[in-house]
Image (cartoon, grey):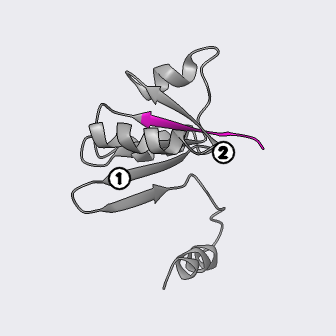
Amino acid sequence: MKKRTVAIYGPNLVLSTIGACLQQKPEFRIVRIEGSIPDYLKKKGAARPEVILFDLMTVQSHFAVSLMHHHPEIKLIGVDLTGHKMLVFSGESSHLLTVEDLVTVIGENSG
């Protein structure tokens, strides 16, 4: 079984606890990102994360959009510890050639 690399970003104690719990699962390899994510991703030999967990309340508002734009292959999961919620960001993209393409994508995400 291939281990999925999950990165924990930020000094939050609860995120560290989540990382420790995930570390107990054999399907995950947990790494901590200290400093900036772009610097970490440029490091030679650094484990390339498939998922990055972060606290929604401690990052700047453009954080996820910028990261998804430059690294769409990485899934971002922001956790809101006060609201007991998580927000999953995906770099999935679609071609926008016509208004009908846009209507189709909007319809896929409607409940």
In the rendered image, residue 57, in percent from the top left (x then y), is placed at: 24, 47
The single residue placed furthest to the top in the displayed view is: 44
Would residue 24 be visible to someone looking at this image?
yes
In the rendered image, residue 5, in percent from the top left (x then y), is placed at: 61, 37
Which of the numbered marks, if any, corresponds to residue 65?
A: none
Q: What amino acid type should be assigned to the residue bearing mark 2?
A: Glu
Q: Residue at x 57, y 15 (%)?
A: 43
Q: What amino acid type should be assigned to the residue bearing mark 1?
A: Val
Position of 48 with respect to 7 (left or right) is right
- 104 lies above or below 52: below
Is the residue marked by circle 1 packed among few (<14), some (14-19), or many (20+) residues within 10 Å?
Answer: some
In the rendered image, residue 42, in percent from the top left (x then y), is placed at: 56, 19
Q: Which of 75 and 67 is in front in this view?
A: 75
Secondary structure state at the residue bearing disc 1? strand
Residues drawn in magenta: 1-8
Q: How far is disc 2 from disc 1 in space, using C-alphas?
A: 21 Å
Q: Name the residue under label 2.
A: 27
Q: Name the residue under label 1.
A: 79
- 26 lies above or below 82: above
Q: Residue at x 44, y 38 (%)?
A: 20
Magenta residue check for 12 = no
Q: Nearer the viewer, residue 78 or 63?
A: 78
Quadrant of the rendered image containing residue 35:
top left
Secondary structure state at the residue bearing disc 2? loop
Q: Earlier in the sequence, mark 2 or mark 1?
A: 2
The single residue placed furthest to the right in the displayed view is: 1
Position of 38 with respect to 48 (left or right) is left
Q: Which residue is drawn at 25% across and 41% down?
A: 58
Prevalent SS, magenta region = strand
